[in-house]
Amino acid sequence: MGIPEPASGAAQPAEHGQYLKFQLGEETFAVGILNVKEIIEYGNLTPVPMMPECIRGVINLRGAVVPVIDLACRFGRRGAAITRRTCIVIIEMEHGEAGRQDIGVVVDAVSAVVEIRAGEIEPPPAFGTHLRIDFIRGMGKVDGHFVIILDVAKVLSLEDLALLAQAGAAGTSAVDAAAA
């Protein structure tokens, strides 16, 4: 939060700390626990018309409207199948002048909070991942396996999500115009 972006545009190194580890399909990811506000059961989503596929809808979280993003879909994959282990991780984002914004993220299952020391975190690979490289903050070693540590500021960028919403609305308008 407030760490300046390196001048080269490369991903920032992940820091020592606690991370929430979760599953998306066969892959294991993690986000810094300081970004996680709470974890709730999947349900009670209200769909919002003309939104991109990765925005599942909104939920009412104690009177606040919280957008819910399908993380698998955001990564360019097929949307997550809903099971009894599916949950929504509420992540609190700092958006400069816009202030704080809670965003829900659909994940297949949350597994644990893990401690990852800085020495156990490698820089993101230059190739071979199924994600945009700027989404990855680092690769953490946990119990002999790698965990992809996400840069939530990039993954949940309001600017990127607004562009997706505009593209979705433009695509819908073009389809409507073609049908007329």
Image: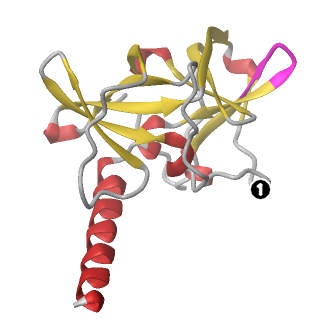
Q: Provide the secondary structure element on which disc 1 rests.
A: loop
**Relative to 4, residue 132 above or below:** below
- Name the spot of residue 64 as percent of width and height, x first: 15, 25
> In the rendered image, which residue does mark 1 sit on?
127
Q: Is residue 26 magenta?
A: no
Count neighbours of disc 1 (C-alpha within 10 A) and say few if under 14, some if 14 to 19, many if 20 or more: few
Identify which residue, 9 or 124, lies in the foreground.
Answer: 124
- Name the spot of residue 79 as percent of width and height, x first: 54, 47
**Relative to 136, residue 87 above or below:** above
Left or right: residue 125 compared with residue 109: right
Which residue appears farthest toward the front when viewing the image?
Answer: 180
Residue 58 lies in quadrant: top left
Q: What residue sits 54% from the left and 32% below the top?
A: 82
Left or right: residue 134 compared with residue 56: right
Residue 141 lies in quadrant: top right
What quarter of the picture does the C terminus occupy? Answer: bottom left
- Name the spot of residue 134 as percent of width and height, x first: 56, 50
**Relative to 29, residue 135 above or below:** below
Q: What residue sits 24% from the left and 78% below the top?
A: 173
Residue 153 lies in quadrant: top left
Q: Main secondary structure of the magenta part?
A: strand
Identify which residue, 91 or 41, lies in the foreground.
Answer: 41
Kindly identify the amino acid type of the residue bearing the numbered disc 1. Phe
Left or right: residue 66 compared with residue 19: left
Q: What residue sits 47% from the left and 32% below the top?
A: 106
What quarter of the picture does the N terminus occupy? Answer: top left
Over which residues does the magenta segment extend?
140-145
- Name the spot of residue 146 as percent of width and height, x first: 79, 28
